[in-house]
Amino acid sequence: MFISSIKTEPIPERVLSISQIVADRGPIDEKELESILIPSELNTAKTSYFNPIFETAKELELIGYNEDKKVVFIGKKDDIKSLTAFRLFCNSVVFKDSSSDFYKIISLFLEANNEWLNYGSVTTSAEVIRIINAETGISSNKLEKDVILGVRFWISFLGFGFFQEQTKLFLPNMYTALKDFMILGSLEKGKEYSVEEFLDGLHDGSSVALKNVGSSLTLNLAMSNALRLLHDNKEIELKKHLDSEKIWHLFPNEEHEFTSDVTHIIIKMAVK
């Protein structure tokens, strides 16, 4: 999923479930694990989704084999105690490889800002498929059939935005993901950071949303929405110092007090 081919079957809840089963019952035979995860009447050659889920949990290094070829839990149990803990764990590891198709596709979603809203459903849009194909080389048929659908589940779960259920339009807002990257990073409550220092203090996984920001000093719509929401919730305070050496630019929003320019960020509340 994150290293190998992207598929629709390993949605986050299923990957968490298989990891929790192994943590509770392992060491366990793979066939027994499959029968627990998938009812026998659903587990046919055409409908079985066990292998993609199993392989995704292995990619995350949550499960593996022992010397007896039994499946065992090899992660940290705190990382699978809840969906929230699992999301935080995933955001800490799934963006390590910037050359992966998963990284590239999510980066494209975020880099597009509001442009893809013009193309209708991102799961079937010929233009969205063309853009992703040009960046990844994944065939158009596979993009429409599996890949974009599979990424859709994860981009929402990881906290980068929302999909309108009817239209499948993607609305970028990485408020949840940004808070994860703040928790995983090295930012301190009560301290004022330049925007550059703030971004440097985030976990490395945040790079998926920060393509070319160093040269443009411009943040994408997803990051801009997240920062404005954090500010409105009084979790951070956005500042604009007129004498600042660098002025950064949020994606324009004429209805917010910070329409664009910002120079500093104060962490007002402990991130959690």
Image (cartoon, rainbow, N blue to C red):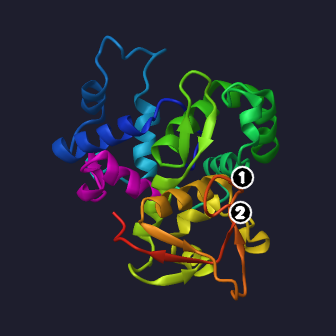
Viewer-closest of 113 and 8: 113
Q: Quadrant of residue 123?
A: top right
Mark 2, Cα crowd under 10 Å, few <14 / some 14-19 / many 20+, is some
Label 2 near label 1: C-beta < 8 Å? yes
Residue type highlighted by circle 2:
Lys
In primary-sequence order, the first of circles 1 and 2 is 1
| Numbered tag placed on residue 111 in the rendering | 1
- Can residue 1 be seen by looking at this rendering? no
| Residue segment shown in magenta | 70-93
* Residue 20 placement, left or right of 259: left
Rendered location of residue 241, percent (x, y): 64, 83
Q: Position of residue 153 (x, y in %)?
A: 50, 36
Q: Residue farthest to the left?
A: 25
Q: Quadrant of residue 69?
A: top left
For this rendering, which residue is in front, 36 or 117?
117
Quadrant of the image occupied by residue 136: top right
Residue 12 image label: none
Q: Is residue 114 left or right of residue 49?
A: right
**Could you say whether the residue bearing mark 2 is in a helix, strand or loop?**
loop
